Image (cartoon, rainbow, N blue to C red):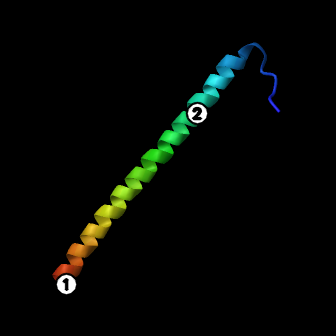
């Protein structure tokens, strides 16, 4: 069910496309940063475990 967007269809669809692309980009960046932080935290915890014996 596609609504009739009239003469502004291309602008509206372009805005939706840009919005979706930005949201996907933010999700990807967030997941990458989360993995990097998790990896760093694991390394720090391993170093502390070795130090504490």
Q: Say if 16 sits above or below 43 in the image.
A: above
Q: Position of residue 47 (x, y in %)?
A: 20, 74
Q: Would residue 36 appear left or right of 46 to someone viewing this image?
A: right
Label 2 neighbour load within 10 Å: few <14, some 14-19, many 20+: few
Q: Which mark is residue 19?
A: 2
Tell me, for residue 40, which label it has, or none.
none
Tell me which label, 2 or 1, sits earlier in the chain. Answer: 2
- Compared across the picture, whether 53 is left or right of 36 comes to left
Q: Secondary structure at mark 2?
A: helix
Residue that mark 1 sits on? 52
Which quarter of the figure has residue 39? Answer: bottom left
Q: Residues within 10 Å of mark 1 (few under 14, many from 20)?
A: few
Which residue does the image show at 59% across and 36% down from the upper left? 20
Where in the figure is residue 17, as x and y percent of width and height? Answer: 60, 29
Quadrant of the snapshot with the C terminus: bottom left
- Rendered location of residue 15, percent (x, y): 62, 26
| Residue 8, x across and y down, in percent | 72, 16
**What's the residue at 34%, 56% (across, down)?**
36
Q: Residue furthest top?
A: 7
């Amino acid at each position: 069910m596609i609504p009739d967007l009239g003469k502004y269809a291309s602008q509206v669809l372009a805005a939706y496309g840009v919005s979706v692309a930005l949201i996907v980009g933010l999700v990807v960046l967030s997941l990458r940063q989360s993995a990097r932080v998790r990896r760093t935290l694991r390394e720090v915890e391993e170093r502390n475990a070795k130090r504490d014996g």
